[in-house]
Amino acid sequence: MSGVAGQVCRDAPRLLYAVWRDDKMKKGSGMERPDAGLRQLTVYRLRRATVQMLSTISQELAPFGLRRTTFSALAVVVDRPGLRQTQLADALAIERPNLVKIVDELEAAGLIQRCQAEGDRRAYALHPTEDGELLHRRAYEAVQAADRRLMHGLSPAEVQALNAALHLIEENAGGPVDAEPKGD
């Protein structure tokens, strides 16, 4: 290799070592942190934290027979009974064909009911069943407890700042954003 590309390749080990050192890592007998360069990117750290958090939430929901997507859909239906399927798809940022599968699953489990929407025979309004409301309440408590564990070590002000920052990142990325960032 020659030119700039060759120089970058020759300098890469030195640059990675500098990143490891800056990341307060000790030089050892191997590559303790092969992703050290990536760890300088907020988006990478956010992805890693997200993977861990989603895994935790999935584990919490498994005993209830729910997945993250079915829990989210059920939560929105419980909070907004009568919501149309298209509104649910928009709220969860899920493609409508994928949402149909989720709604089918929740309906088959007896957790929600599809009813014809008032004024539009082509649309369905979604309503939670009593079993759906009960399961939602129990699963939501488990998710809240997991959320508190995941935020352990952060002050209420730091959690509020984190949520405000995530709100802004979502807005900067062009995604849907709540009217107000929430503290918890």
Image (tube, rainbow, N blue to C red):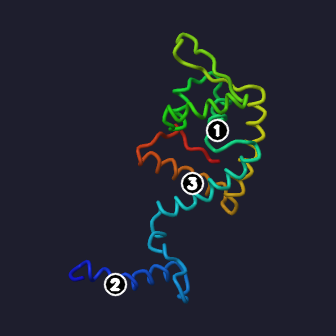
Closer mark to the observer between disc 3 and disc 2: 2
Q: Earlier in the sequence, mark 2 or mark 1?
A: 2
Q: Earlier in the sequence, mark 3 or mark 2?
A: 2
Marks 3 & 1, CB-CB < 8 Å contact: no
Count all numbered tags in the image, as a single digit: 3
Residue at mark 3 to residue at mark 1: CA–CA distance: 28 Å
Q: Give residue 161's mark.
A: 3
- Tell me the crowding category of disc 1: few under 14, some 14 to 19, or many 20 or more residues within 10 angstroms, Cα based: some
Q: Residue at x 78, y 40 (%)?
A: 138
Residue at mark 2 to residue at mark 1: CA–CA distance: 48 Å
Q: Where does residue 39 sit, x and y in percent of width and height?
A: 49, 69
Along the horizontal axis of the image, is 22 left or right of 51? left
> Where 23 falls versus 141 (above or below)?
below
Q: Earlier in the sequence, mark 3 or mark 1?
A: 1
Judging depth in this view, the residue of 177 and 53 nearest the camera is 53
Closer mark to the observer between disc 2 and disc 1: 1
Q: Residue at x 21, y 81 (%)?
A: 3
> Where 16 falls versus 173 (above or below)?
below
Q: Where does residue 126 sit, x and y in percent of width and height?
A: 63, 23
Closer mark to the observer between disc 3 and disc 1: 1
Q: Which residue is mark 2?
A: 11
Judging depth in this view, the residue of 13 and 150 nearest the camera is 13
Q: Where does residue 93 sit, x and y in percent of width and height?
A: 50, 38
Q: Amino acid at mark 2?
A: Asp
- Tell me the crowding category of disc 2: few under 14, some 14 to 19, or many 20 or more residues within 10 angstroms, Cα based: few
> Where 57 falls versus 48 (above or below)?
above
Q: Give residue 70's mark.
A: 1
- Please, which residue is most extreme toward the top here? 119
Q: Amino acid at mark 3?
A: Ala
Q: Amino acid at mark 1?
A: Thr
> Hey, which quadrant is residue 53 in on the image?
bottom right
